[in-house]
Image (spheres, grey):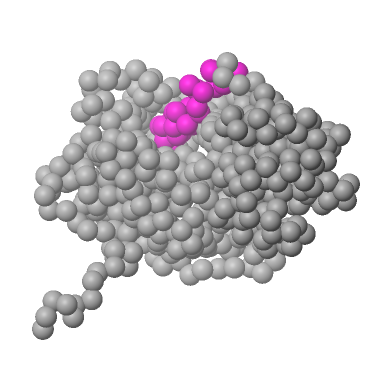
Amino acid sequence: MSTASIPPKRPGLQLLNHISTTNIKGDLFGGVTAAVIALPMALAFGVAAFGGAEGGAAAGLWGAVLVGLFAALFGGTPALISEPTGPMTVVMTAVVADLTSRDPQNGLAMAFTVVMLAGVFQIAFGLLKLGRYVTQMPYTVISGFMSGIGIILIVLQIGPFLGQAIPGGGVLGTLSALPSLVASAQLDEVLLAVITLAILWFTPRRVRSVVPAQLIALVIGTLLSLSVLPGDADGLRRIGVIASGFPQLQIPHVELPLIRVMLIDAAVLGMLGCIDALLTSVIADSITRTEHNSNKELIGQGLGNLASGLFGGLPGAGATMGTVVNIQSGGRSALSGLARALVLMLVILVGARLAGQIPLAVLAGIALKVGVDIIDWGFLKRAHQISIKGALIMYLVIALTVLVDLIAAVGIGVFIANILTIDKMTALQAKSVKSVSTGDGGLILPDDEKALLDQGKGQVLLFQLNGAMLFGVAKAIAREHNAIRDCKAVIFDLSEVSHLGVTASLAVENAVEEAIEKGRLVYVVGTTGTTERRLEKLGLFKKLPPERTNISRLEALQAAITALA
């Protein structure tokens, strides 16, 4: 059979990632190193999301395995490491608390169903090719949103840090219960949490380059709890029993009265996961000098979260720390993600009993440090120096994220930022709308056209638009046209217009119609491409004789001077 009869491959249909065999050693070492980083983080996030309840640690570990596995197999960023992250954990904590309070019997099953739905949303975003739009938000909003999530994670860890369960009511509930939490603090657990934070903050860089500080804190904290501070039934709170087998399938469960709540939670979780993953993909690109496939990455993340929810795992996204460590350790392809998932799976199946001895206070210290790291300290320090308005937007988003709602925070923040941007753009575009009646009126024109304008002695007006004419410039068009007083001919010059929006098109139409009603000679020149087609569909050219539209600016000036002579 000839090669001509073989249909060409279509890259868009190759969903499964190619596993490179040219960097096996680097990928395996990167994957193992990333697994070491992931272990304490997955345990901490699992316990945090479930409020210390049984099963949280296992959910965190299986979330790290499943999200990482499927994202590596099907994602669009080969070196990306995906696992439960601080932002995703914050949202999942709220979802679990809300649904279990509404329905104690089925709340947890519905929470895992929300994770599955979040994955479905992400797959849909990828199939609809929305990847490039996900992270196109003002940085002030992203910074405020992430800093708000960091604050939430810190506040929610106050209870476990002090040796107690997380109070109900989220951030406000924890803050209102703060006096009682402090009064009944368990000093031994506080000591362990403080030691954990000290290790995380003060471990020398050269040590951290060999062994992650989180793992050091986990091991030392656990050993101290077993030797110096032995815990019994009335002593230290520990993770407890972690099921060492494979997870059970979670049948999706939906209660019709709560379906709206579940869909909103899933949309928030899915969108947050998209933002988290794609921002990390950009970081990975900058280190590896490659370019990720945003839409494919969203599909991989969606499949990972769908699988994680089906087997009782936490939701996840691209993790910056794990990704950077993987790349720095030699990971370059999806093989590193697969190796990491395999190592974590072996830990669950073989070392679950040992992990069950880890004190909850140690995990609280690790999670609290993650919250501190999520806060965008660099921008917080400089925001007011860069832009007062931008800083106010960031502070507003932080306050709304912490005290009100994640969706409200992003929605209101983006809305206000866009309004301010539109206002600024409108002011800039307004300068591109000019009308002159003399050769030295401020427009750059050839000498012969300037001479014709001067010859008109103020009776011929050149009304020129320049650049992209979006809806914000409509007011400037109307204002400039209303300023026209004594003239007998108006030439609307659109030769320098790169884009004419619908609202601006209607403003031009209104200006032309008003000039015609006042008995002025009207010419519309320089229209090409989409600008010409848009005005033609509006029927503007039907309101003028062909000899006043299908001509150049020079010809229009000559015709106007001749007609007024």
Examine the rendering and report whether any part of residue 355 can be seen.
no
202 versus 528 height, above or below: above
Residue 252 spot, x, y in % from top left: 51, 68
Residue 6 spot, x, y in % from top left: 19, 77
What quarter of the picture does the C terminus occupy? top right
375 versus 53 height, above or below: above
Highlighted magenta segment, given as a residue range: 360-384
User: Which one is nearer the viewer's eye here, 343 or 515?
Assistant: 515
- Residue at image position (80%, 35%) is 459
Picture quarter containing residue 196?
top left
- Residue at image position (74%, 62%) is 542
User: Which one is nearer the viewer's eye here, 419 or 377?
Assistant: 419
Main SS type for the magenta part? helix
Picture quarter containing residue 100?
bottom right
Residue 180 spot, x, y in % from top left: 65, 28
197 versus 240 height, above or below: above
554 versus 483 height, above or below: below
- Residue at image position (75%, 57%) is 544
What quarter of the picture does the N terminus occupy? bottom left
Q: Residue furthest bottom?
A: 1
Tell me if 130 is positioned left or right of 18 in this view: right
